[in-house]
Every structure is written in structure tokens, then in C-alpha cells.
Image (cartoon, rainbow, N blue to C red):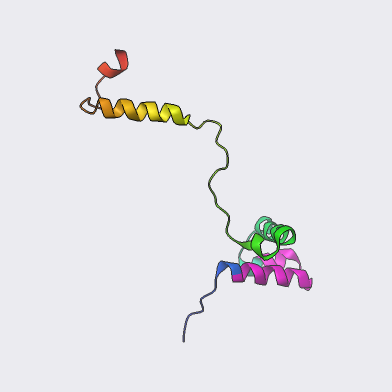
Amino acid sequence: MAWKNVSAMDERLRFVLEAQLGRCTITDICKRYGISRKTGYKWLNRFAQHGFEGLKEHSRVAKHCPHRTDSKMVEQLVEQRKRHRTMAADSKTWLCG
């Protein structure tokens, strides 16, 4: 017996289509697919707004990070690190002067 290969996209589309039929509650469908209701509604909203494209996997990388170190500062730190390669990481002298 061969194992079924089911993609996440196929499962999401199947979920959306089953929910649109209205035969069962969203809670019951979510249980059957092993997802939370929050996730179920997320897929339904994405499908409603963007169609099939909305069901694709989205990047989880943060779009904004207010406490991220400025790129110029990172460049300066890297440059200093390159200049002072012989300094030991536990050396206190580079901190004080």
C-alpha cells in the first residue's frame, strides 16, 4: 500500500471548499483537519481576499523590527572586529580604552 502524498496547499483548499459547503460547523471541520479555529478562519479569510494565492505559505520573517541594530553600526562593528582580530573575547582592555 502506497502512502498518500498530500501537500499543505491541497489540504488548505480542501478545508476551504468543505467549509464553503456549510454542511458542518467550522469547529467540526477544524477538528477533522487538526487545526485550531483561529487557523481555520485565517485560511478562510485569506481565500476570500486573495483566492488560491492566499493559501500559499507566507514568509515568517518579521517585516519590521524596531530594535534592530542600524546597518551602519553593524558595518562599523564588523570593521572594528576585523581590525582587532588578535584581541581575546574575554579581554577587558578593549572595553576601557
Residue pictured at 60% horizontal, 71% vertical: 10
**Residue drawn at point x = 72 percent, y = 63 percent:** 27
Q: Who is closer to the viewer here, 90 or 29?
A: 90
Residue 35 is situated, as x and y percent measured from the top left of the image, at 62, 62
Relative to 7, does residue 78 appear above or below in the rendering? above
Q: Is residue 52 visible?
A: yes
Question: What is the quadrant of the C terminus in the image?
Answer: top left
Query: In the rendered view, does 82 fall on the left or right side of 52?
Result: left
Residue 4 is covered by the magenta coloring: no
Magenta-tinted stretch = 10-30
Q: Is residue 34 above or below residue 74?
A: below
Q: In the image as oriented, which residue stretches furthest toward the left? A: 86
What's the residue at 64%, 59% (across, down)? 36
- In the rendering, at what x and y percent does residue 94 appear? 28, 18
Q: Is residue 18 magenta?
A: yes
At x 54% / y 74%, what residue is drawn? Answer: 6
Majority SS type along the magenta span: helix
What percent of the width, then of the height, locates residue 96? 30, 13
Q: Residue furthest bottom?
A: 1
Q: Position of residue 12 (x, y in %)?
A: 63, 67
In the picture as drawn, the residue positioned furthest to the right comes out as 22
